[in-house]
Amino acid sequence: MSDEFISLGSARAMSILSGRKRRLHLPHLRAHESTHAVHIMKRKTRTPLQLLAISGLVGVVVAGCGGGDGGGGQSPIFPLPTVAPATADPAPPPVVDPEAPQPSRTARCAVDTTVPASYEERRLPNKLLPSDALSFSEQLLKASGFDKFGPAFAETLCKDGLSGAASYDEAVVLLRREGQKLWQAALDRVQGRVVEGPLSKSDDRMRYWARLTMTKALRQWRPDFTLDEGQRAALEREFERASRGQYAIDFPEGPGVKRILVSGFDPFTLGNPDAVSNSNVRIGNPSGATILSLDGATRTLPDGSKAVIRTFILPVNYGPFMEGMQEDTLGPWFKPGPKRVDASITMSQGRDAFDLEHFNGRYHLATIPGNDDTYPPCKEAGGYPAAADCDIHPTARWMGHESKPWLRDSPPQFTQASLPFQKMIDAQTGQGIVNPATKKTGGWGVRRNDQYSIRLCTKAAADSQALQEENDLRTKPLKDAFEAAWAVATTVSERMRILEDYKKAVAALNLPVVPEISPIETNCAFSGSGGTYLSNESAYRNTLLRDFYRLQIPAGHIHTPVMTMFGAGSGGAITDATFESYRDAIVAQSRNLVFAVAETLTSSTAP
């Protein structure tokens, strides 16, 4: 198969060996994916890594390894670094009983309403229509019965001038408890145990918006005991993790149990804050809805063992990933022990079908920010993988070593999924599910996505390549004339004269010398199969941790179809039949895909 080169964001096209110029379409680079003016190249799998020098222009080809039925956990292309085992793994947090009696109030407190809302909290007042009496979040929370969480939490923190906690340690316990209450209420609603209000029970959005009313109250809380800036940030992280189910994970022990972890995401692309009319604010996320429906699910497998599924939700923000939130959640269950996982799946909303992402890239910078309107500190450094935090740097407390300063291959630029691809494709997971887009039974297609792209790693390498291209452009007329004269020359002496004339003409141009590009400055990941956004990041971190612990388990990423479709004339509605039909159908097939992975588990990895 031919190697193809493209230049995204650049008017120049790179030369192909045949002399033709082509532009490669990468369908996995969606509107929110990064399209910096850098040279990227993609090629099919099952080819060795190689370097091609074409007319003085260095192009880099990255290769993939064939997949098919998933296979083991470690890719032969990307050998693991030899590192010391992690010695400071955080222990799973103590169990917090949400129903335990609260401590007596002995400390004083106040509420500082002058504290400005965070960027995400500033969307709470957003309305669907200017004439609406209530904001979208108020309508949604009222329709789900989750409007009580914000006020109740604010009173728990500070009521009648008395604080709900008298010390930092008490505050940690309080915030874990209150966060877990919200998580459990979301599970209870989606799974049909406690459903208040007219909103469909399968909706995922109430947890996200209720959490924002609670984080606003937390940041306004002013107890009379001292909390420094670091402690306040730590308390916010405790609540964040607890409200996402990250402290609620637990598994039964024993070889007769197959333990499966699945993560999903918050809604995202919710529009600008402080908007009077903003329909984007009503977006949901089918991965989050799937997670809430799946937590605690069990399934009896063909060999008589029982699959147990536990879930959690990740934020659509770079900061928590960079702080190690995902590793802190997965790590306790990846370590050796009687509750070690047998499969770990990440899930997010993606395209027009179910994509099983094959390759996960280390690079993380897309054209849209997180829900908090921030990017990783990368854009200002030029967007090159070696610069700032353009590449993922996993936390040392789980990986056993620091990945800074940047090294190209520590951690590796790509990881591979180890999902049972073909069995998932063949499992007929859409059977009996009506696809609202086609009105036909059979759900959506399931496909393995092998696409990825690479780029130069450093600005120096990119500058060298750009200079080479400029030199090539200046010498092109001379080269064309040389090739034409050479073609009609009939004697060796004539051709030697033509060659000497060509060399003199090129030398007369006094072209600048192009610095050599080191091979260590090439072959960096740009886009994984799942893109360059947080979907890919969650997949990379999940599979990298799998490789660090050398687990031979199914691990990888599922991109679901896009869910947010509303019927005509529903611009002012928080939900409608079209929106709910897409969500319910996508969730049903997403669950089936997880069950399909469970069906392939034949033995426990736990000792």
Image (cartoon, grey):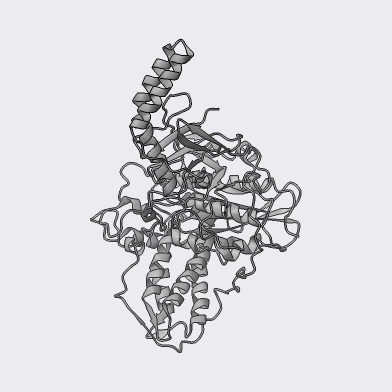
Question: What x and y, as percent, mark residue 446?
Answer: 55, 38
Outermost residue, top side: 490
Quarter assignment of residue 402: bottom right
For the question of whether residue 329 can be seen, the reply is yes
Query: Quick one: 23 or 330, which is closer to the camera?
Result: 23
Q: Total marks drawn?
A: 0
In the image, is residue 86 above or below residue 550? Answer: below
Is 279 displayed left or right of 529 in the figure? left
Quadrant that contains the N terminus: top right
Quarter assignment of residue 330: bottom right
Outermost residue, left side: 131
Q: Residue at x 43, y 41 (%)?
A: 29
Query: Quick one: 580 or 308, which is closer to the camera?
Result: 308
Question: What x and y, as percent, mark residue 580?
Answer: 44, 47
Quadrant that contains the C terminus: bottom right
Question: What x and y, as percent, mark residue 567?
Answer: 36, 42
In the image, is residue 452 above or below residue 343? Answer: above
Outermost residue, bottom side: 106
Is 73 displayed left or right of 326 in the figure? right
Q: Residue at x 40, y 46 (%)?
A: 34
For the question of whether residue 573 can be seen, the reply is no
Query: Quick one: 477 or 324, which is closer to the camera?
Result: 477
Query: Quick one: 23 or 30, which is closer to the camera?
Result: 23
Question: What x and y, as percent, mark residue 101?
Answer: 54, 81
Q: Residue at x 43, y 86 (%)?
A: 225
